[in-house]
Amino acid sequence: MDQSLINQYRALDDGSSNAWHVVAVVPQEEYRLQVRFNDCTEGVVDLSRLIFSNNAGVFAMLTDFRRFSEVTIEYGAVTWPGGLDLGPDAMYDEISAYGEWRL
């Protein structure tokens, strides 16, 4: 992960020692996120299929890439304005095993 991008999207350190806490997130093209966890595990979250599916639900609001790019981190979880978030524990499990989490 590019250090300059990490610095732009670094989370506030909440002092957690949980490996599955996200400490950096960078939005990428094609509705993907590059993430880094507290234990330095890194990987990609691919939201493209979910966001554009008929079952997108609240995630449909992320079809606007500008809104998708407003991603941030709160308390170790990837979040967007409006309270939308992704479970960091499930994300960590998939990325640890496969390097990528496709939703």
Image (cartoon, grey):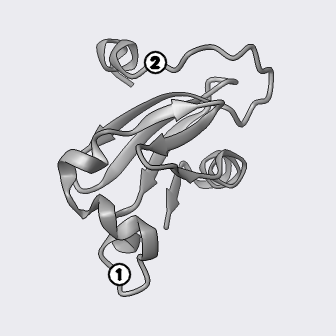
Name the residue furthest front. Answer: 82
Q: Residues within 10 Å of mark 1 (few under 14, many from 20)?
A: few
Q: Mark 2 — residue?
A: 10
- At a point 64% along the width and 55% down the height, the residue shown is 94
Residue 51 image point, x, y percent = 35, 69
- In the image, 60 versus 7, the foreground residue is 60
Q: Secondary structure at mark 2?
A: loop
| Residue 53 shown left or right of residue 17 in the figure | left
Residue 28 picture quarter: top left
* Quadrant in the rendering for residue 13: top right
Relative image position of residue 27 (x, y in whole percent): 31, 40
Q: Which residue of the protein is positioned furthest toward the bottom in this rendering?
A: 54
The label on residue 53 is 1
Residue drawn at point x = 26 percent, y = 48 percent: 67
Circle 2: is it few (<14), some (14-19), or many (20+) Cα within 10 Å?
A: some
Q: Is residue 18 left or right of residue 14?
A: right
Kind of residue sitting beneath label 1: Ser
**How far across and how far down the image is residue 52, in percent?**
29, 75
**Quadrant into which the N terminus falls:** top left
Q: How many numbered marks does the figure carry?
A: 2
* Residue at left offset 35%, top offset 81%: 53
In the rendered image, the vertical position of residue 88 relative to residue 57, given as above or below? above
